[in-house]
Amino acid sequence: MTQLTAVSGANRPIVSLTDVIKTYTLGKVEVPALRGLSLDVYPGEFISIAGPSGSGKTTALNLIGCVDTASSGVVSVDGQDTKTLSERQLTDLRLHTIGFIFQSFNLVSVLSVYQNVEFPLLLQRKLNPKEREQRVMTLLEQVGLDKHVKHRPNELSGGQRQRVAVARALVTRPKLVLADEPTANLDSVTGQNIIDLMKELNRKEGTTFIFSTHDAKVMNHANAVVRLADGKILDRITPAEAQKAMAAGAEGH
Amino acid sequence: MGQLKLLVQVAFRNLFASWVNVIIGGIILFGTVLVVVGGAVVDSLDESMSRSIIGSVAGHLQVYSEKSKDSLALYGNMGGEADLRVIERFSDIKKVLEQHPNVKTVVPMGTNSTMLMSGNTVDLTLARLRDLYKQAAAGETPELRAQIDSLKTHVRQMIALLEKDLERRNALAAENAMDPADLRALERARSQEFWDGFEKDPLASLELLENRIAPLVTDGDMVPLRYLGTDLVNYQKTFDRMRIVDGTAVPEGQRGLLLPKFSYEEFFKLKTARRLDIIKEARDVNHRKIAEDPELQRRLKENQTQTRELLFQLDPLKTQQAIARLQKVLGSTDTELEKLLVAFFTMDDANFDARYQQFYAELVPLLDLYRLRLGDELTITAFTRTGYARSANVKVYGTFEFTGMEKSQLAGSLSLMDIITFRELYGYMTADQKDELAKLQEASGVTDVAREDAEAALFGEDSSLVAETSSGSIDEDAQLAGSSQARRQQELALSKYTQQDIDDGVVLHAAIMLKDPDTLEQTMVELQEASKKAGLPLKVVSWHQASDLVGQIILVAKLVLYAAVFIIFVVAVVIINNSVMMATLQRVREIGTMRAIGAHRGFVLGMVLLETTVLGLVFGAAGALLGSLAVKGLGMAGIPAFHESLYFFFSGPRLFPTLQASNIITALVIVLGVSAFSTFYPAYLATRVSPLQAMQTDE
Ligand SMILES: Nc1ncnc2c1ncn2[C@@H]1O[C@H](COP(=O)(O)OP(=O)(O)O)[C@@H](O)[C@H]1O
Ligand SMILES: [Mg+2]
């Protein structure tokens, strides 16, 4: 609790959702995915979004990640209202401010580990080759894959692949990293390792993390758990509370 | 920079990632090979043809009167000679044309064609006999007498052979196959009485044999003769492809004819020898085997069945010599020449080379190898445009060929003639010449021979000339003899000519050699203008156009190639388009991920385009390499002309294509163009892939 207030009081939120509604249209049927979601995330937070399947976790992350647009309400990222941005500006925002970790890793299969991590830097065109190499190698060391630079993704285990993805997401030093169920495709031990790794980077670099999960153990490191249900925020609680709630919920069934 | 490097790396790694790419690559490879090889072959064809055509007859440009009905066709066209309007004075157009700075030489020309009788063996022997009698008239020597008697025996032997032949033929055909008049003439020529009375009036007796007996022998040929009348000296200086093979060039200021070596061999050589030559070449050059080749077998068979030409040529003495030689060669005791010849001409792959050599060593010295000997005079009869026949005697000085087209029938059927004789045969006269001729004719009493008569004279079918006489004292006959005498005098009067004569006379067309052939098109236009200004409107055509059908063939070949290339690449565009589309769909997730991570649409567009470009370059380069090797191989081995009519286009029996940088560049440009073109739409679609695609989970 103390930690939560300490961080949240620091400055402006990096992500701010206000009364966000997202409705999908499937043919003639309107599927409400988010029904008035409001959420502020502050720099340096390590937030877990929890909730049952279909509660709107992925939809919320897509809106924050600027890969989709809200039906109504305001989504602002790094102080910018995403509705006012062009396609190009949104892409730039993703490139420079946000890092993505995907559930299915999404590495480029024909590129080596090193090249996959270097990829966003090449898109940014900010660093010279030497700086790039340094940056990539530092991150690969941090995720423990500095011995595997030349490997192709299909030569790695799932956990190793997700580490590469983590390195790729962080290599541009983004202010915000989004991860939609990053551990869903991993066994629990490996999943735990990935979350540990993320937490470590959050602590060291101060990067803001928002990740979704429905695994209670994974939420441990979070400094807040935002619980979603039917496209709305149920509450914002600590991991301990969340675990208790989930245990109770499980008993209830 | 780093981005591009990455894109190239992605492109290269994707190259073999999908079987789709391998198919696209295969198409590109095949297309490139086709463009390189096809391009090189067509270019070489064009090059060798242009060298041949320009350097033999056409020059860079040809000019002829704009008022002509037809367009010029140097190698003839189907319906006979093109109808060209006469240009009255060559010097007029020469002056205008030579003023152009790019014109190097102007050569006057005219082409026409007619038929010649190559003369049959009986005719030739009789002609020789007639010569001997003429010599004897001036003073008989015992030596001459012996020669006359020998030839007379030879003729009687021929008539005996002829009769046997005819009997055989008659037995096969329906009764009355022979004209009774012919039979009577033959009977008379066989009779002892005829020969006893021969010496009383030898010329009249010869007349009978020439008019009635010789036509019964069927070994004479109608030889097509196309001739180009030109300023021979200037021609030879200008056209470097022309080369004298046997004999000599026509001396400056002399009338004369040069026969193409090909025609000379084809039409005037002893048929038996010609057939052996053809078989030898087929065996030596084309590695054909008699045992496997029905065509060669047929030719050998003909040599066995058509020994008549040889039998006729041999007088009794030579017949004995031939028998002796053949007996020795064959180890035979047979005494009948015909049987020996049949045995000798029974050849196969094993004995051919030896027999061929024996034929030339043993038999040929006893024979006339050619029916027309160099140095002989040839009477050429041609029809003027108004339908009158005109004859001229020209000495055959030699044979020639065009380098690189030695085997081409098309190039080898055009004889070269001095332009003075050509004009005479063409029959067009300017006002001045008409006056001059009128005076000459008045002096000698010559009139033009009407077409029918001339045809008759040419083909020997006029009944008035072969009336049933033994004396030959018919009026018209005398008149004909008289007229040819007069013509001879007239010819003699004109037999020497000067450059002035050449320049001041009629031409039908003229060849122009340029100093700089690269500006051919422009020069054409300028010459046309200049001629119009000078009041002598000319049509100026390039060598391509002037050679008409022949020139179009290269165009057709190019069109066919381009059409094939076009079709292949249309197919390629469709397939590549579909494949890239498929490949893009397979990669939606990857592309979506890139977009999510921050790749702009331009990056995705560049990536897909670059991938196809790399694909095009890699397989295109491989295709170009393969194609180059193929051309190199073909250049070494040569593409065989599977038919002799191709010799002309190939400049010989084989085409040796060479590779030019332009062939490869063209191929690569086309390939890259095609692959880029066919990728635009799929690439555009790829840019529309949403980053949301990256978020989808696997299940
Ligand atoms: N592309 C889509 N089209 C239509 N309905 C969708 C789409 N994506 C999600 N939904 C619906 O929106 C709701 C929220 O889904 P989602 O955000 O994926 O939830 P979660 O990630 O928590 O499982 C669900 O009812 C889901 O069926
Ligand atoms: Mg989800």
Image (tube, rainbow, N blue to C red):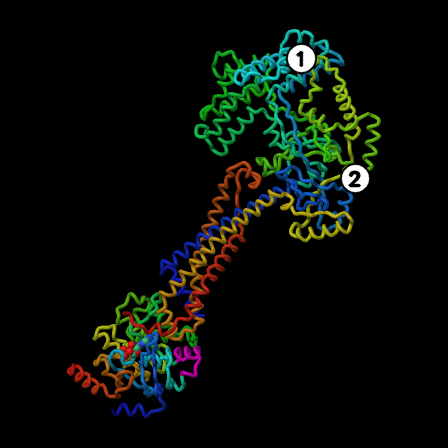
Secondary structure under the numbered disc 2 in the rendered image: helix
Decide: marks 2, 1 in contact (CB < 8 A)? no
User: For this rendering, which residue is in front, B695 or B204?
Assistant: B204
Q: Residue at x 39, y 87 (%)?
A: A79
Dominant SS of magenta comes to helix
Residue B504's label in the rendered image is: 2
Is B575 magenta? The answer is: no
Q: Is residue B413 left or right of residue B33?
A: right
Q: Is residue A180 visible?
A: no
Q: Earlier in the sequence, mark 2 or mark 1?
A: 1
* Crowd around label 2: few <14 · some 14–19 · many ≥20 (10 Å): some
Name the amino acid type tagged 1.
Gln
Residue B223 in picture, x, y percent from top left = 63, 29
Residue A206's label in the rendered image is: none
Residue A53 in picture, x, y percent from top left = 25, 78
Name the amino acid type tagged 2.
Asp
- Residue B74 in which image quadrant: top right
Q: Residue at x 74, y 19 (%)?
A: B477
> Callout 1: residue from which chain?
B
Q: As displayed, is residue A28 above or below residue B30?
A: below
User: For this rendering, which residue is in front, B36 or B300?
Assistant: B300
Q: Could you tell me how far apart the alpha carbons at marks 2 and 1 are, in whole angstroms?
A: 48 Å
Residue where numbered disc 1 is placed: B147
Magenta residues span: A82-96
- Residue B56 in which image quadrant: top right
Q: In this rendering, do the residues under marks 2 and 1 share a single chain?
A: yes
